Image (cartoon, rainbow, N blue to C red):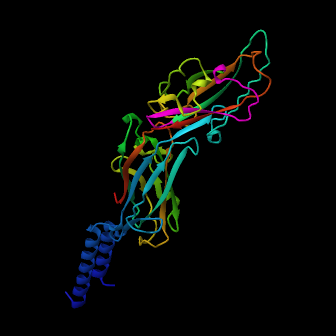
Amino acid sequence: MHQYKKKYIIFSFIIFAFLKPENALACFSITDDFNSPDPVLNITFNFEPDLEPFRECWSGALRIRSTKRNWRLVATRRGPNPAVNQGDSSDNIKPSDISIEFEVKGFGEAQADGAILVSPFSSETDLSSIRNGTLIISGVKRSGGSCTIHNPNFYKLKKKLCLFRDYVFNTGYYNGDISYILVAP
Amino acid sequence: MTSKKRKFRSLFVVILIALLYLSTSSTKVISNQALVPLSIIVHGKLIITDAENDTKSGENPTTNIHLGLTPELNNSIVSGKSSIRIRTNLSNWKLLAQRVDQSNNTIIINPQDIKLLFTTQTGSKANPYAGKLVSPFDGITNLSQISSAKSTDVLMGNSKTSIDKDPTNKNNWFQLTSTYSISPDFFYDKGEWNTVISYNLVSP
């Protein structure tokens, strides 16, 4: 091999390592459990207070795909705010009244320890823990080599929200939302 | 510089530029967000349970009271009682009562002869002022005050029964105890007399 070729090859290796080619081609996606991108998952609690069942719950799931080793899932909450209701404001439903429980599993090539639920979301907490841009998952491993929405390698984030059917809550309507964004650090 | 060397260098530069472009361009995003709209609707609820069976199965209870009289000289009063528990998240409610005398009565007892006393009590998470006994039921009265012709107001509610969150809905009850009593008078014939008092919890 010519001397100049050797120089170029060594120089290329250095540049290649420096540029982190995994970043250059990285991508990520978030879908619902049916692989629909940018999903909207509606939660509706529509109830009367009652003796039993005392808790009403909603469950849903998101799929996260990332070819990057480092990624984060952050969430921002608005409300729930009373829309039309009656009674003392201290008896309105508050974020702290709604429990939330996350669970993450790896499917396909996605390894279970590649997505870590950050405290306090590693165990049951309530909606008041989610504020503006709150870190939910710290991703330390990629889910696989592709992030196309139908590939079988993904992290599944299950969510369960529950509300007590307590007689103390004011009747009426309450609205809010939680937005999740997948970002690279 | 030979032509071969020049070509190799050109190729290297092109690859380098491509890599630089890819590395500086932002990470490819296919879809990176999810929205979870949250909607909560809380409806009003009125519920009566049996204080002795304060669960879902004790809802809309039938409580039987049996007063067995044997006339006595010492005139000891015979009494019986029943307790119901009220829960509501409505701020405006009332408890109505109506009496229905039964056709299978074999003796005549005047409802006036049966003394009636209502008392209220609340659990630790309930508001003792949520409901107020309506006159004449705020003192000792008699069964004739509960009409058989129409519903009679017994208890008026002006706030929800809960005063605080209750982790199990176990201690947020507003209880009404009704005590019925009669003297074992020698005046009454031998036989049986029955009546039914129905209570109805409503919100205007």
Where does the magenta region start and end? B88-113
Residue pictured at 56% horizontal, 43% vertical: A54
- From the viewer's perspective, is residue A86 above or below residue A109? above
Residue A129, visible in the rendered structure? no
Q: Position of residue A12 (x, y in %)?
A: 31, 74
**Residue B36 location (% of width, % of height):** 40, 56
Quadrant of image for the C terminus of chain A: bottom left
Please name whichever residue, A18 or B41, is drawn nearer the observer in this view of the structure. Answer: B41
Q: Which image quarter: residue B171?
A: top right
**Spot occupied by residue B28 in the image (x, y as percentages of width and height):** 33, 69
Extreme residue toward the bottom, this view = B3
Does the segment drawn in magenta span residue B18? Answer: no
* The N terminus of chain A sits in image quarter: bottom left
Name the spot of residue B30 as percent of width and height, x first: 35, 69
The answer to whether A125 is drawn above or below residue A114 in the figure is: above
Q: Is residue B81 above or below residue B46?
A: above
